[in-house]
Image (spheres, coloured by chain):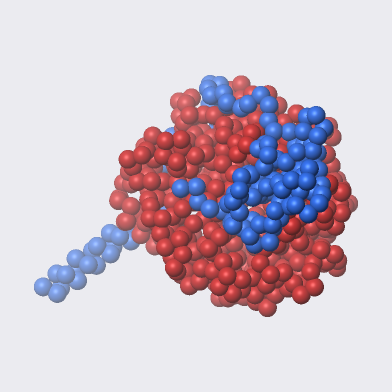
Amino acid sequence: MNRIVATTTVGLLLAFSLSILALCSPRAPEDKQKVQPVSEQAPRLEPHSIPATVVVNAPAVASQGDCAPRYKHGLTGSCINNQACRGFGALNEKGQAECSCYGLTGGCRAGQRCDAIRKSCVPEEELPFERVPAH
Amino acid sequence: MMRVHGSRTRFSVAPFGTGLTFLLLLAGCGKIGQVTGQTDATAATTQSETAGTTSFVNGTSRIVVSFNDETPDTNLIVYGPGTRHTNLGATQLGWSYSDDGGATWTYGGSLPPPAGWAVLWGDPAMTTSGASYSMVFLSNLAMPTSKFPAGGIDGSVITGNGKTSYIGGACIAKSKDGGKTFAHFQCVQNTDPVADVSDATLGHFYDGGSMASSPSGEVFAAFADIATSQIDVWRSPDGNKPFERIATPFPNYVVASHPRLRIAPDGSLYAAAQILASAETFYVYLSRFTNGQWQVPHGASNTTVVYPSVDFGATVQGSALTVRTGPQFSFDVGAASEGGGDAVRLLYTRRDGNTGRLFVQGAACDLALTSCGDLAGWRLGTSSANERPVEAFNPNLVAWKGFIGLPPTWQGSFVYRFGKPATSVYLARATIGYVNGSAFTIPVDIIKDTPVCSDTRGYWGDYDDMLLTGFNNDGGTNWVRFLTDSSKGCTERWGFTGRAQHVQASRYSY
């Protein structure tokens, strides 16, 4: 009985080894036979839905005064027009200083801060480079 | 729904069943190798986040890869469960190289900060001179001594309003022997005043990095300038003369990501970045540098995600397992189909509106960037609401333009999480091409079920590189794709470090 088991095991190992050799032998990947890098016909592109205008990188305005909010972990917001700003000061189209967070006029709401890396409002307690999963 | 047709990815029909296929590939082919973390000096510390290049010197074809390297930092970057103390002299600029096509790797070492600079802070970028294949360049973010606090840094390197940082530029090292050894070449920094950035004149806060070199030997380096929300591009005319800052590719736009640079076969430079369109809405934009000027940037994607975090729905070492990610796009310039409308191709990451899951989408533009669009058949890593939840991210795309007897190809790769909860990721490659004139791709796993051990911020290496490394006798191409390696186990998941984190590489021929 043991001999039968041993023979069967050796046979299986041999088949296994052969299958490994077959898999690793030099041959083209299966997708290379099917997928061509270029097409003889002009490819059909689906146009992107890109807005005609995008947020302008407005000139920055320095924070002035001592009304800038202080966030957890030591980061700070701005003080713009003598008002606390959870964002950054920027010149608007009329050349006036206003608080904004990368396209969000008025800056972020309470409990949030404007993140210069992510260019958006994030929870105030979130450290820079610390990204909370979206779901 | 993804079309698979015999694909070997986990979200497809595997001919042998995934378990046996996994065993056969791992046990038999030996195409996955450790770059760091073997028995050399790198084993005791962490390495992750790669940029690579290839070189040719004295008859040797060499692959060089740089990574955020903490090998020399045992006493220079000191971690506690929720703390990190960074001392003067810390460096993350390290590299390894392979002279046998990626089968084995040798740790090349690391460089300490040069005079006037306190710390080298990773985010590697690399390139090889297009005119001299033994001349290799490697950049790292850097902290100038003038910004470095007495006593070192506790915790984050970002300060004040978030546009200020101890980081104040980048340092570029150069190798004359094909990447075996490096020496400091030049540090670059933008010291223009910025109204709301108090430390701007000490050097703007740089993030990310990308390098490229033209056939004539021009060398370019680009960094995200957080102080100005722009991309700063630096150019050396020949790799010997110093880098000087040239015009920014996306003036007046708000840049929201690391840049990526590529050189077209005609030698022109392309830059890409994710751009803020409206509040919390981002697109990939491209620009082309010809005759000393950047052209008007052109949108090249639909809405995309910026630095998304991937939730694994699992707990490892007592903390929720997440992976934060780097720039969610990649592009290259190469062989085009009839009409030339796809000479520039991109892969970028989107979030599915129905399932909320990340997937990778392919797009194309003509060389002049006058027309861009998505190709429906280049959608990777999607799963419907009722299927096992797959999330695909961190795409790479590399073109081989072709030469006599060496046909062109376009190779992409991406990381995906299969199912939720999960504690591992898969890495797949795919030819970004066509079948009977229709855009089509078949993803194939090249690393399967490799464990993830991020720190509790989600850091597990923000990005990794993919390289064309050579050619077969039959005209086929050889490729390497790097990925963080936590196969030695996950013994620590602290606030600023996860261990083990090393670098692995998957090699394949196509």
Tell me which residue sits at (68%, 78%) in the image. B75
Give the quadrant of residue B21.
Answer: bottom left
Q: Is residue A29 visible?
A: no
Tell me which residue sits at (31%, 56%) in the image. B20
Tell me which residue sits at (30%, 51%) in the image. B17
* Residue B215 coordinates in the image, percent (x, y): 76, 42
* Residue A111 coordinates in the image, percent (x, y): 59, 51
- Seen in the picture, residue B249 relative to B181 is either above or below; the reply is above
Give the quadrant of residue B41.
Answer: bottom right
Relative to the observer, which residue lies in front, A115 or B344?
Answer: A115
- Seen in the picture, residue B438 relative to B199 is either above or below; the reply is above
Q: Colour of chain B?
A: red
Residue at the extreme left: A1
* Residue B196 coordinates in the image, percent (x, y): 80, 48
In the rendered view, does B455 fall on the left or right side of A78? left
Report the quarter where the N terminus of chain B lies: top left
- Seen in the picture, residue B246 relative to A65 is either above or below; the reply is above
* Residue B470 coordinates in the image, percent (x, y): 60, 50
Tell me how many marks there are: 0
In the rendered view, does A13 fall on the left or right side of B467? left
Relative to the observer, which residue lies in front, B386 or B473?
Answer: B386
Give the chain letter for blue: A
In the rendered view, does A82 fall on the left or right side of B443? right
Residue at the extreme right: B241
Tell me which residue sits at (85%, 68%) in the image. B115
Give the quadrant of residue B457.
Answer: bottom right
In the rendered view, does B118 fall on the left or right side of B264? right
Residue at the extreme bottom: B75
Relative to the observer, which residue lies in front, A78 or B59?
Answer: A78
Q: Is residue B320 visible?
A: yes
